[in-house]
Amino acid sequence: MTEIASHRGGALLWPENSPTAFYGTVDLGVEQVEFDVHPTRDGRLVVIHDATVDRTTDGTGRVCAIDWSALSQLRLKGTGADRIPLLDEVIDIFRPTGLTLRLEIKPDADGRPYPGHVGEILNALRHHDVLQRTVVTAFQLSTLEEVTRQAAPKDLIWLVAQHVVRDIGDIDDLIGLARRRGAQALALHGRQVTAEMVAACRAAGLGAGCYACSDEPTIANALALGVDVFTTDCPDLALRMRTARAA
């Protein structure tokens, strides 16, 4: 069965990466919950998509330039009272559930890896004993390589940016890159994934998935291709479509 991952906790159902979204995801019936992690200036790990707080909170500035004491006072837009959650808190929300954690390791606002960020995340996952129920994802192959040097999570997925697919073109070349850098699966944009790509990944012993499947055409394509998992901002729609397809 193709699994469904609630992207940022279901970003078109609730404010993204918010406690409200994560508690809502618990009751949806999806298999995975996706979220993003950045460090604060004083080394705390927080769950927020952007490298800055401007778009999703009532504050401004780079996440990595703000101490947790100040960051915790900001409020997420559209929630009323929710603040940016710590990674520890998100893990605690999903600990009693059977959901797989799908954690994206993010770079800074300039697209550069944060020094020591991978190690801090992996240490947190080990501390909470959830490393083996966590799928780690990244767009940067150097980040995936760093993960493989330090740990073996449940799965390690290369999120292949659209421009990379256009620039490289050949799926075999993408697979070769992924295997050399330690990725165990590829996830392509929902508008780019094809049956040929899925078949090539599986022939090479890699998992195949997609991201940004948040409308009926991309969800239908992901389900028809039988990808391992896809992320969606509309997990409720994806669940209904999967159920209807199985009926």
Image (cartoon, grey):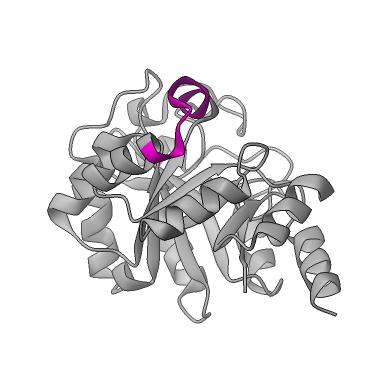
Q: Main secondary structure of the magenta part?
A: helix
- Residue under the image location 76 percent in, 60 percent down: 238
Where residue 174 sits in the image (x, y, percent)? 39, 37
Identify the image quadrant of residue 78: top right
Q: Position of residue 217 (x, y in %)?
A: 81, 46
Residues drawn in magenta? 163-172
Q: Nearer the viewer, residue 244 or 27?
A: 244
The x and y percentages for residue 69 are: 38, 41
Would you place residue 185 above or below residue 43 in this image?
below
Q: Is residue 15 above or below residue 94?
A: above
Residue 172 vertical position relative to residue 64 in the rendered view, above or below: below
| Left or right of 180, for residue 155 | right
The reply, left or right, for residue 80 in relation to residue 148 is right
Task: Tell me if residue 42 can be seen.
Answer: no
Residue at 34% in and 30% down: 64
On the image, the x and y values in percent for residue 188 come to 54, 42
